[in-house]
Amino acid sequence: MSDVTIQVRDNGPLRIEGPVRLVDQSGEEIAFEGDVLKLCRCGASSTKPFCDGEHGRIGFDAVHTRAPADE
Ligand code: FES
């Protein structure tokens, strides 16, 4: 059995490592290379759903973007 690891990066993307399939809202496969994906969670990437590093430029602060129910 293969494992998939999803790591929440500090003030950055979700890093997904393992054999996964990425699809869009229509179920169409989104191609990527390698076994590691970095998915944007700051909303600022110009290459969504992938992280393009923009989180660093905008000063993404994940602590302050949680829903009030999480606090
Ligand atoms: S998390 Fe990296 S650009 Fe959004």
Image (cartoon, rainbow, N blue to C red):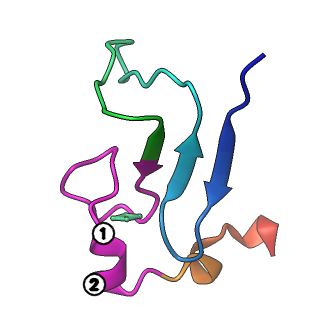
**Residue 17 — which label?**
none
Task: Look at mark 1 in the image and give the residue it sits on.
Answer: 53
Q: Which residue is mark 2?
A: 57
Q: In the image, what residue occupies the spot 53% across and 76% down?
A: 11
> Is 68 or 3 nearer to us in this picture?
3
Q: Nearer the viewer, residue 54 or 18?
A: 18
Q: Can you tell me whether the CB of the residue at mark 1 lies under 8 Å from the nearest atom of ligand 1?
A: yes
Return the x and y of residue 13 as percentages of the image width and height.
48, 61
Q: Is residue 67 magenta?
A: no
Q: Nearer the viewer, residue 9 or 42?
A: 9
- Coordinates of residue 44 in the picture (x, y in percent): 29, 65
Left or right of residue 13: residue 29:
left
Q: Is residue 10 left or right of residue 34?
A: right
Asked whether mark 2 and ligand 1 are closer than 8 Å, the reply comes as no
Q: For the view shown, which residue lies furthest in the left direction?
A: 46
Q: Is residue 67 above or below residue 48?
A: below
Residue lying at 28% horizontally and 47% vertically, measured from the top left: 48
Ligand 1 quadrant in view: bottom left
- The structure residue drawn at horizontal position 73% and vertical position 72%, both measured from the top left corner, is 68
The image position of residue 41, as x and y in percent, is 46, 59
Where, by quadrant of the figure, is residue 62 drawn? bottom right
Instruction: Please tell me in which quadrant of the rendered image residue 27 appears.
Output: top left
The answer to whether mark 2 and mark 1 are in CB contact below 8 A is yes
Quick check: 26 above or below 9? above
Secondary element at tag 2: helix
- Residue drawn at x 73%, y 30% as measured from the top left: 3
Q: For the magenta stretch, what is the residue range?
A: 38-60
